[in-house]
Image: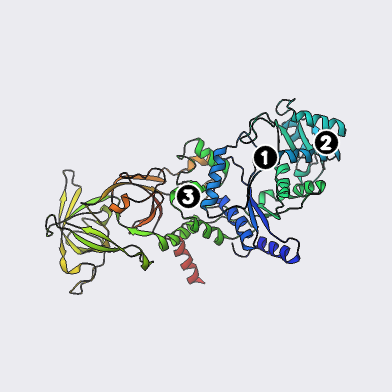
Amino acid sequence: MGSHFIADIVEADLASGKHAEIRTRFPPEPNGYLHLGHAKSICLNFGLAAAHGGTTNLRFDDTNPTTEEEAYVRAIERDVRWLGFEWNALYYASDYFEQLYEWAGRLIEKGKAYVCDLTAEQVRQYRGTLTEPGRESPHRGRSVEENLDLFHRMRAGEFPDGSRTLRAKIDMASGNLNLRDPVMYRILHAPHHRTGESWPIYPTYDWAHGQSDSIERITHSVCTLEFEDHRPLYEWFIAELGIFPSRQIEFARLNVTHTVLSKRKLLRLVGEKAVSGWDDPRMPTIAGLRRRGYPPAAIRDFCDRIGITKQESVVELGLLEHCVREELNRVALRRMAVLRPLRLVLVDWPEGHFEELAAVDNPEDPAAGTRPVRFGRELWIDRDDFLEDPPKKYFRLAPGREVRLRWGYVVRCVEVIKDAAGEVVEVRCTHDPATRGGGTPDGRRIQGTIHWVAAADAADAEVRLYAPLFPDTDPEAVPEGTDWIERLDPQSLVTLAGCKVEPALAAAAPGERVQFERVGYFVADERDHLPGRPVFNRIVTLRDTWAKVQQQAAGKG
């Protein structure tokens, strides 16, 4: 991800001989799907290690059995691989439950941990505030022997949920609330997706995370800024245990306009059926971005461009879409599709006669070659490409006007057919045989070119036009008393049936990305696209507002 302050730290540690090899990890909790913010962390952790000849582990921080599922584990593995990364080793925090339990006993023996009978609410009350010190638990003075006995009985399952906790004994007057005797274990009789019912107690994130890093000898434990205040506790546990000193480094999390990047909020969207699921193409989840058709290379490019800093900021969604367009413009094959079909008939074309025209597959890649497209008497054009009474500077088809049909002929509209309601249902044209493939023999200028599909070959398709879930730049900046979920855009998905597409598109493989000429970039839906029933999702439009903004900024500079 280029040069940034974390890369500078890594390079300094290598140069000084502090570490002979860099080891990083990506440690998601398997309680939901990964989103775009996780993509930034994935690219950072794997990128740091790869750039310096090191390794990266994938570790599931599975310490909350009531919210975690094996299905999330499988989805996360798929997402990391799809982004283009492969882990050195796969671990789970639950792999270390026995070691963590043993280390907790060691802290008890040192007088650095105790069993507390306060309820969760009482613990909060005793903790104090940012301006007032906390109060010590009445159980803080228990003997080592009593604490060990109670802790062993907690593990044996003798006590009900929430009745006791194991807490570190640090400093109830500390200015850092995380050091005010934090909870290390809580009692929870709940089955775990890997360990079953063998553990009635579970470690907290703060207790398990740093020690898991140490066990794996992670040299640089990279996380987002909300964990900065937890670093002193992370280091306290490592120092008290005398184990490998992983170094925690924090960076600013990713914020993107027109979306929410909180697993809790995304879970709510799914749970309340505001979207069709975690892989809804409007979701900022990696699964949603994949189904939407975003190429992994574009997401990696986006993560590289936004950089790594300590400063919180908001990134324009337009930048991500710009990265997607740049990648797709380079690799996507071109095809013709008519989303709102209007019949065009060439009255001077022989019935039953067809010609094969050569259409360029990708003008950015000469090696892509050309494909044959059939041209005949009856065609479909887009209804937006015809106006009966056009305004000035309208360069598409209208009565008495000429346009070029992409890769084909110049045609002139000579008649308009309407239905009983007065709606145009057919336009009739003549064609100029001397204009096949480009140019006009008399040098007349044809200002408009429109796309088309031959009626005899066209396949019917469903096309889904996606837009951001939220029209507001900041969906969470809502008036008091308003729920952010109410700000969803009802037009974020528009489904068009009866679209007409080239026959090659009907045979496209699920996940195949193409450019619909003059329309946008689309992908064959990975779930619903079937032979004989093509379904395409719009990835992005052709219009690149981000590039325009950057050009204007460069001009001012």
Identify the residue shown where x is 72% and y is 25%: 160
Taking 47 as reference, is 181 left or right?
Answer: right
- Secondary structure of the residue carrying tag 2 is loop
Amino acid residing under circle 3: Leu
Residue 394 in view (yes/no) = no
Q: Between label 1 and label 3, give the one nearer the viewer.
A: 1
Whether 5 is drawn above or below 284: the answer is below
Q: Which residue is mark 1?
A: 94
Identify the residue shown where x is 60% and y is 56%: 46
Query: For this rendering, which residue is in front, 423 or 220?
Result: 220
Q: Which residue is mark 3?
A: 289
Identify the residue shown where x is 46% and y is 53%: 294
Whether 144 is drawn above or below 58: the answer is above
Query: For this rendering, which residue is in front, 97 or 169?
Result: 97
Taking 11 as reference, is 140 left or right?
Answer: right
Q: Which residue is mark 2?
A: 136
Amino acid residing under circle 1: Ser
Q: Earlier in the sequence, mark 2 or mark 1?
A: 1
Indicate the position of residue 132 as horizontal and vertical percent values: 79, 41
Amino acid residing under circle 2: Glu
Occupied quadrant, residue 182 = top right
Q: Between label 3 and label 2, give the one nearer the viewer.
A: 3
Residue 429 in view (yes/no) = yes
Indicate the position of residue 317 as horizontal and vertical percent values: 49, 55
How far is the residue under mark 1 from the one under mark 3? Answer: 30 Å
- Secondary structure of the residue carrying tag 1 is helix
Indicate the position of residue 491 as horizontal and vertical percent values: 40, 45
